[in-house]
Structure formats: C-alpha cells, structure tokens
Image: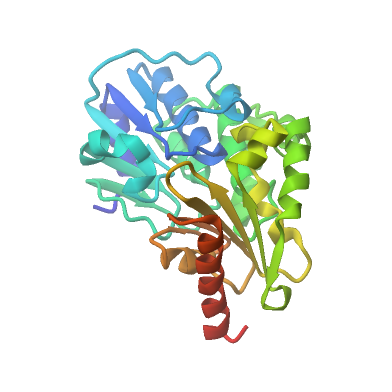
Amino acid sequence: MEATLCELAGRLNDWDRILVLSHRSPDGDTLGCASALCRALIGLGKQVHFACADPVTPRYAFLFEGLTFPDFEPEHVVTVDVAAPDLLGTLKETWYPRVEMCIDHHATNSMEAPLRYVDSHAAAACEIIYSLLCEMKAQITPEIADCLYAGVSSDTGCFKYQNVTPQTYRIAANLVELGAHGAEINRRFFDTKTRARVEMEKRVYDTLHDYFGGKCACVSITDQMKAEAGAGEDDADGLASLPRQIEGVLVGVTLVEKAGEGYKISLRAIPPVNAAEIAAVFGGGGHAGAAGCKINASLEQAEEQIVAAVGRWLEEHGL
C-alpha cells in the first residue's frame, strides 16, 4: 500500500534485524540512501545488514567507512532507490518476495511491497531518506549528512539538472549545517578525474554519432575500450552525460557493453524530451531527464534500435 513517512518511521522504529537493498550498478543516490539509513538504524540500536548485487566501487567506498554488518537472518527487507524488481539483479529471486518497504523517487516505480513510498518530485531518493530520518527522530551525524549530501549531489549533477527544486537546496543546506563536507564531495564527484577516465573520454568521443540534425547524439563504451584505457567501473561513471553536453542535443544516448547481456542504454534528455518514455519502449524507465534500459543485441543493432525509438518520439512530438 502507499504509505506515509510517518508510517515508515513508525515501522522502522519498531523493527529490528533489517536488510537494506540497493539497485545493481549502484550510484551515489542508492548508496547514499543505504549507507545513511544503515548508519541511522545502527545508531538506534538496530541490527542492520546491507546488500547489493554489484560491488561498491572505490568512488563510493567512503560512504561505508567504519560500517560493519553482522550476519543474521533478516526479519524485514527495505529497498532504497530501486525502481523495478529487475534492478535488484541477482538478489531479486531471494529477496524481492520478502520486500516489505520500498522507498523511491522514480515515477515509473513498479515495485510491489506492503509499504511503498514513492515521491517523484524528489530530485534524489536521499531527499526522502533525510525527511524520513527527521520523522524517526534519528540523529543525523556528520557521517550520515555526508552520505545524504553525496546522494543528492550525484543525482542532481551537482545541482544543475532540471530535477532540482527549492526543497533540494534547503535539504542540502541543512546537511551542510549538520556537518556534510559539501565542497569536498562535489570536488570528488565532479572535479577529479583519473588518468584512465581521461583516456576513456578520448575514446568515447571517437565513437560519437549525430542523428536527426544534431538533436540526438550517441556514444558507446565497450569492454575493449575500458581495457585499452585501463579503466574500471568508477572511471566510466558519469560518461553518460557527455553526449547531452553538446550544443543542440536534446537526447544523449550512451551504450555500455555488458558481457553476455548486450548493452545497457543510458538516456539523458533536456525538456521537452522525456527519456523515461523512450526507455519504456524496451522495458526500462527512470526520469524525464535521465532513464535507462537494456538491449540484448550487437552494438550496431542496439544503436539502431534505440536511435529509431528516439526518432519516433521526436516525430510524434513535433520535434
């Protein structure tokens, strides 16, 4: 059922032995939510464990510094920033039937749980976790403030995306007052690049294709490119924003090779284009400005299919 923050807070204050789940290929928002919630619950004397289908990369490891998770059989399962069951990855079969609480900000959310709280107006799911912790009367330590600020900053592109609201700025300001290292986190996420990341960007630009008079720009990232650049997952993080940065582009498309699974498609759009509607053609989803899906095909076929979907959307909307 759709729940209120008050109801979520009441349950979490009553519960113990809680498992918190993030989505696969975890980003700053899902990990910021999970680490903040885990820290707050531990501070309230709860037994808590965290799980994700994919490892936490070095870029986000600081969110979990000092945290240890004991082994126990969970009594309650909570998902954060997980918009669809498949986003649980390899954890879906074991844990999705037991999910009791879903906390998310994606309008396309398709999770089923006894307690659901989905606020599509929140720029980041960490905004919801902040409000939830306030409702729970949990202490927001500087470490928790860092986790929440990291999620808000990463999911808003350092506060420059269209999803930012006045409430986003208010929450960010409150987190800085509570001890979040805002400038350091922003620098870590947006102003620092490894040598491998620079090598990746050079290779990504070499794959650039323009479509529909420059309204759509498409780039690709293959495993071979990563190997040549000596790049890991962190070095590829954020590359999806590159094609949208080109003047005149309404839709930026990034195809990322997933061994044995074809390509993960990341869509970045500016108004009036709705990236989520395009991704939905292939069973994906997300937000109007940022969405994703998967296409199990060769690179050439995957690019052809996603570009065709973009073209249909632009034509249907007179663009």
Note whether 255 is above or below 41 in the view shown: below
Question: On the rendered image, what quadrant is the C terminus found in?
Answer: bottom right
Q: Give the total number of marks visible in the rendering.
A: 0
Picture colour scheme: rainbow
**In the rendering, at what x and y percent does residue 169 appear?**
65, 48
Note whether 132 is above or below 16 in the view shown: below
The residue at the point 54 percent across, 46 percent down is: 257
The residue at the point 65 percent across, 29 percent down is: 180
| Residue 233 image-quadrant placement | top right
Note whether 157 is above or below 228 in the view shown: below
* Residue 225 makes an appearance in the image: yes
Q: Nearer the viewer, residue 127 or 192?
A: 192
**In the rendering, at what x and y percent does residue 208 appear?**
72, 59
The residue at the point 56 percent across, 30 percent down is: 147
* Residue 236 makes an appearance in the image: no
- Left or right, residue 54 beside residue 173: left
**In the rendering, at what x and y percent does residue 53 appear?**
40, 33
Q: Nearer the viewer, residue 129 or 228?
A: 228
**In the rendering, at what x and y percent does residue 69 appear?**
39, 15
- Left or right, residue 12 beside residue 204: left
- Left or right, residue 294 beside residue 65: left
Note whether 52 is above or below 8 in the view shown: above
Q: Nearer the viewer, residue 57 or 262?
A: 262
